[in-house]
Image: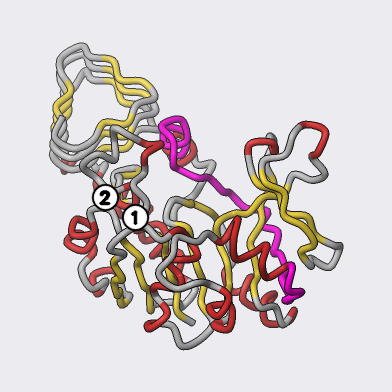
């Protein structure tokens, strides 16, 4: 099975961080964000991955290359103009010859992909949507299902008196190639407002898989800070390969730390960091080659490389 990651958005909600760095490769705990998704795929034996790009694609290609450094094979499809989520899937059609696992490029999650795939196959679905529960469903589009997981209704950002469930689209799908026929070519077209409601109207079999694991959309500054705190405080555990990289980077052998500096156990540091006399760092992620001055206090912060 191939995977397609939709990584073409401009990341406007995350500006100014994304003005010069595409959202899919913003550092999360000092690791480019897409590495988390790629490692999740590789761990489940999915090593053939297509990246759909539009915004500053050269920077992403330069960083990730052909994927061989990460044990996968990467191919790139670049949109000349934004095509929306379903439009990007259609644009990648020449690369797709089978069932495809699709990820939104700004989702971090704990997910048993083997279980999701088995659920999709056993239900004989044309499309399987991963769902997650949220505390405030009014801010999202809701997905209603029957007890067996069959999807019955989509409800976009309902009012308080319209809320019937708290399950939302988690931005991960398994799609049969046949659904490409329902997507217009070379048009901006979305999964959420276009393809999925259309498949439902046409009575195509659509099923949901309800994830109980960690899930976050990193697309706003608030969520970007939250995901760091979740990683630093071990509410989200990165894949082993990435966790090992974080631990090695934070070793004192790769940093210069004054003897009387205070650094708590929930802080990550990249190589080349210098920490001055009397500095205090709490629950923070410090990027490569950063210099923290004497008696500075850093608390709950994310500092990018070279500051």
Q: Quadrant of residue 281?
A: top left
Residue 122 position in % (x across, y down): 73, 82
Which quadrant holds the C terminus? top left
Determine the residue positioned at 48% across, 51% down.
Answer: 108
Task: Looking at the picture, tell me which residue is in the foreground, 248 or 84.
Answer: 84
Looking at the picture, does residue 176 appear above or below residue 222? below
For residue 146, side relative to residue 200 (left or right): right
Q: How is the image coloured?
A: secondary structure
Write down the quadrant of residue 193 in the picture.
bottom right
Please report the bounds of the magenta region as a residue range.
Answer: 201-227
Q: Residue at x 23, y 20 (%)?
A: 261
**Residue appearing at x 67%, y 41% in the figure:** 157
Tell me the crowding category of disc 2: few under 14, some 14 to 19, or many 20 or more residues within 10 angstroms, Cα based. Answer: some
**Residue 225 belongs to magenta span:** yes
Looking at the image, which is closer to me, 238 or 107? Answer: 107
Residue receiving disc 2: 248
């Amino acid at each position: 099975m191939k995977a397609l990651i939709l990584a073409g958005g401009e990341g406007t909600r995350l500006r100014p961080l994304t003005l010069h760095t595409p959202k899919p490769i913003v550092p999360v705990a000092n690791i480019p964000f897409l590495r988390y998704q790629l490692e999740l795929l590789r761990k489940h034996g999915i090593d053939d991955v297509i990246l759909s790009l539009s915004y500053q694609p050269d920077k992403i290609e330069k960083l990730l290359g052909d994927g061989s450094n990460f044990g996968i094979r990467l191919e790139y499809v670049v949109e000349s103009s934004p095509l929306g989520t379903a439009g990007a899937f259609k644009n990648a059609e020449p690369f797709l010859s089978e069932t495809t696992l699709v990820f939104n490029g700004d989702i971090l999650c704990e997910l048993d992909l083997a279980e999701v795939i088995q659920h999709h196959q056993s239900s004989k679905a044309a499309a399987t949507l991963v769902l997650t529960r949220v505390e405030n469903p009014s801010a999202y589009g809701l997905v209603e299902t029957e007890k067996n997981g069959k999807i019955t209704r989509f409800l976009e950002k309902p009012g308080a008196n319209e809320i019937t469930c708290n399950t939302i689209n988690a931005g991960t799908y398994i799609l049969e190639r046949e659904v490409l026929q329902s997507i217009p070519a070379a048009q901006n077209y979305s999964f959420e407002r276009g393809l999925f409601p259309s498949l439902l109207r046409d009575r195509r079999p659509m099923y949901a898989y309800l994830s109980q694991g960690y899930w976050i959309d990193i697309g706003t500054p608030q969520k970007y800070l939250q995901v760091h705190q979740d990683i630093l405080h071990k509410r989200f555990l990165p894949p082993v390969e990435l966790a090992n990289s974080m631990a090695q980077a934070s070793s004192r052998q790769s940093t210069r730390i004054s003897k009387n500096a205070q650094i708590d156990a929930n802080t990550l540091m990249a190589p080349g960091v210098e920490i001055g006399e009397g500095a205090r760092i709490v629950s923070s992620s410090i990027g490569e080659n950063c210099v923290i001055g004497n008696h500075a206090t850093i608390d709950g912060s994310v500092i990018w490389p070279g500051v």
